[in-house]
Amino acid sequence: MSDTSDGAVIRCWRMLRARHILHAYLFIAPVVVLFGIFRVAPAVQTLLYSFYKVELLRGRFTFIGLDNFARLLTDPIFQQAARNTLVYVVAIVPISGILGLLLAVLFNSRFRFQEFFKAVYFSPMVTSTVAAAMVWWWMYNPQFGIINVLLKLVGIREQPWLMSSSMALPAIIIFSVWKTVGYNMIIYLAGLQGIPVQFYEAATIDGASAVRRFWRITVPLLAPTTTFILIYNSILAFQVFDQVFVLTGGGPANSTNVVVLDLYRQAFQRYDFGYAAAEAMVLFVCILGITILQYVYSKKYEIAY
């Protein structure tokens, strides 16, 4: 009799567990379906298009294998766009990260109007990139822009900024640093507040200076935060588009043309979707490779506490 009752209990428990699992899958099903439709399916479609000559207006798809990728190797416009993108990434990631860390260390101590200044530095991050870029376009104006006015006041000659092929990309980098440094500051500030105060107290008792405490305690214990910021900023930097499109449109003389902007032109101006898909796949592989490299390499320096 007891065996029968035990079997009934087990069957009932299994039915309840199966019902709970079914309910869980039903709850996540909308998210999974939407993710599949708007993320997975376009990614797979892009991969397939990269091996075809796509003529959407004619409804014609011609398989050409790796020809689109071969064209990338000999296309001077794409090569320049790739170089510009790489320069942008190499500049924006460390500069915005270091400035964000320094600001976080500054704001980690209490002082008057601290919250106000936090909001001031973070506000660019929540501002529309297009709207902010339009304001900076006026600021960069070589004739009446506020930046040249300020330079003239301190005795520095006016700069052509967005009108110069040598100054346009640095101008975009300056704008992007201003746009992203506030986010890095908030993330680093959260990491700093998670470090136990006892470490700093013990180091102070041992006679360690503020600089030594920063290099021996703060920097090592912020390794996980730094890893996240490096990966996040790198991904965003490789996908830069809005500010370039608004500020320069890729000019002058393609000096600020980047991969995503060139991809956009190939797909929606020249309607060469296969070639644009190949550019997208190359960009995806670069982002994935650098992300994995940063993650694996930074693991060596992470410290648990």
Image (spheres, rainbow, N blue to C red):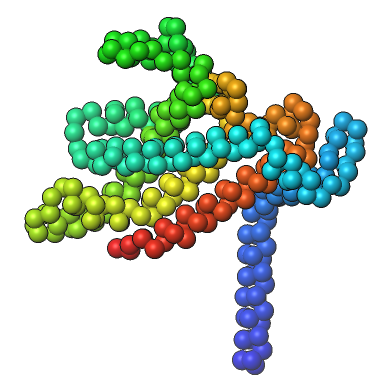
Number of marks:
0
Left or right: where 234 falls relative to 81: left
> Is residue 199 or residue 270 the one in the foreground?
270
Q: Position of residue 181 (x, y in %)?
A: 39, 35
Q: Position of residue 271 (x, y in %)?
A: 79, 30
Considering only vertical position in the picture, is 77 above or below 203?
A: above
Left or right: where 79 falls relative to 295: right
> Is residue 29 or residue 103 the one in the foreground?
103
Q: Quadrant of the N terminus?
A: bottom right
What residue sits 81% from the left and 50% below the top? 65
Farthest-out residue, top: 144
- Residue 123 lies in quadrant: top left
Q: Is residue 185 visible?
A: no
What residue sits 56% from the left and 27% below the top? 255
Q: Position of residue 109 (x, y in %)?
A: 20, 40
What residue sits 28% from the left and 32% below the top? 115
Q: Quadrant of the C terminus?
A: bottom left
Q: Position of residue 277 (x, y in %)?
A: 73, 41
> Is residue 208 or residue 116 the one in the foreground?
208
- Residue 140 lies in quadrant: top left
What residue sits 57% from the left and 48% below the top? 287
Considering only vertical position in the picture, is 46 above or below 134?
A: below
Q: Is residue 52 visible?
A: yes
Considering only vertical position in the picture, is 302 above or below 162?
A: below
